[in-house]
Image: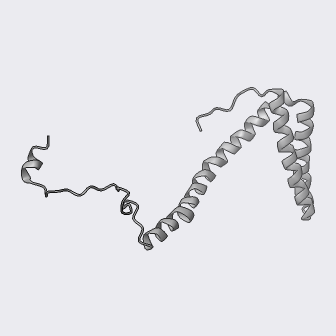
Amino acid sequence: MAERIPARLTAAEGRKFALTVGAAFLGLGIVAWYRGHAGLAGMFGGVGLALGLAGLTVPGRLGPVWQAWMGIARAISRVTTPVFMGMVYFVVFTPLGLLKKLAGHNALIHSAGTGGYWVRRAEPDRRSNMERQF
């Protein structure tokens, strides 16, 4: 997230951005037209057509449009990323952990013969060991 948006856009990057986003807007316009929303279809189609033509004719001058697009994308990602990660945690990992707990699984206990994490003490604690630990 600390990565800054570059101020300049090369012609190849501008063309790639304009044609990709323009095609996406044209696709949205086609879907809107197919569903009977003529006004929305015209808006999406117009933006897509304008971006496509700009990408073919003046791709190096699309820097401000690209910066605005990336600013919007960054703002959206600040909201959607925590929401999505929270959903993954609470919808996937928490139920799996609860199911494992209900099944009696304990991640700290290894099966016999594998060694395990815990070592049994031979003798109980003595007070002298606690007073002089080293």
In the drawing, does residue 83 fall left or right of residue 20?
left
Q: Is residue 66 above or below residue 83?
A: above
Residue farthest toward the front in the current orientation of the protein = 113
Where on the picture, by quarter, is residue 92?
A: bottom right
In the drawing, does residue 52 fall left or right of residue 103?
right
Could you say where residue 91 lies in the image, as x and y percent from the top left?
56, 65
Q: Nearer the viewer, residue 104 or 16?
A: 104
Q: Nearer the viewer, residue 50 or 133?
A: 133
Quadrant including the N terminus: top right
Quadrant including the C terminus: top left
Where on the picture, by quarter, is residue 118?
A: bottom left
Could you say where residue 58 lies in the image, as x and y percent from the top left?
89, 29
**Residue beneath the point at 88% across and 52% down:** 27
**Residue beneath the point at 34% across and 55% down:** 115
Q: Nearer the viewer, residue 78 or 16?
A: 16
Could you say where residue 3 lies in the image, as x and y percent from the top left?
62, 33
Q: Is residue 51 above or below residue 59?
A: below
Q: Is residue 84 above or below residue 59?
A: below
In the drawing, does residue 58 fall left or right of residue 88?
right
**Residue 62 visible from this viewpoint:** no
**Residue 122 visible from this viewpoint:** yes
Q: How is the image coloured?
A: one colour
